[in-house]
Image (cartoon, helix red, strand yellow):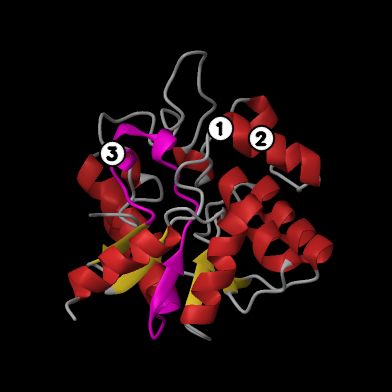
Amino acid sequence: MSQKQNLFDLEAQFQSLSADAGLALIAELFPGKVVFSTSLGQEDQVITQLIATQNLPIQIFSLDTGRLFPETLELLARTESKYKTQIKVYYPETASVEKWVADKGINGFYESVENRKSCCYVRKVEPLKRALAGNAVWVTGLRAEQSANRSDMKRIEWDEANQIIKYNPLLDWTFDQMITYIEEQRIPYNPLHDQGFISIGCAPCTRAILPGEDARAGRWWWEDSKKECGLHAK
């Protein structure tokens, strides 16, 4: 059976499943080979809660770029404590960061889209590749509603760049549905969300959004681009 047919069959199998049921099934179908990447955003906090409360054998990991908000790191600690779980943290290679800063300057990412993307590669994409290596399924918190370039994503996809199946259990969740769930389940979240920071990444690359702006308008706010860092490249 071809890979395309396998993905089609998986997509059909997961199409009608709730997020919690889907996570349980993916862990059963790929034992010991499912990982979840959390940036500690609201979507990711929901998935962490679903994994932890069901005690699913899915490794949760996060990427510490070295430029995160203090509130994000504090949330990581609170989340581990609340759910009695360990979030494995991956860091960029020291030599790569040092070379990038020496070549571009400490804030050289402001100077061009190319510089910014190369910074994202060193601090996020390369560590992600290490985290995903040897696994079969990558669980993400992507929602179709987040941005135009995510609206055509599927629940089950093939990530060519990382040679891994990508599972997006919250793909069809609305923002309001997510917020209601967080409130009902008393899930810890980043206090910056209450200050207008909807999509939160590195501190120098994130601002609060204005009324009516796209949810990801606060990411790399100084440039006109697709607002992606390369983690979810098609």
| Residue 76 x, y percent position in the rendering | 69, 59
Q: Which residue is mark 1?
A: 175
User: Disc 1 vs disc 2: Cβ atoms closer than 8 Å?
Assistant: yes
Density class for disc 3 (Cα within 10 Å; few <14, some 14-19, many ≥20) is some
Q: Distance from label 1 to label 3 (Cα)?
A: 17 Å
Q: Which residues are magenta?
A: 130-155
Which quarter of the image is occupied by the C terminus?
Answer: bottom left
Q: Are marks 3 and 2 in contact (CB under 8 Å)?
A: no
Q: Label 2, on which residue?
A: 179
* Frontmost residue, 30 versus 198: 30
The percent position of residue 43, horizontal first and vertical second, equals 57, 47
The answer to whether residue 61 shows anywhere in this view is no
The residue tagged 3 is 149
Label 3 or label 2, whichever comes before in sequence order: 3
Amino acid residing under circle 2:
Ile
Q: In the displayed structure, would residue 19 be above or below residue 63?
A: above
Q: Tag 1: Cα neighbours inside 10 Å, few (<14), some, or many (≥20)? A: some
Q: Quadrant of residue 161?
A: bottom left
Q: Is residue 208 magenta?
A: no
Give the x, y percent position of residue 124.
41, 61
Query: CA gap, disc 3 to disc 2?
Result: 22 Å
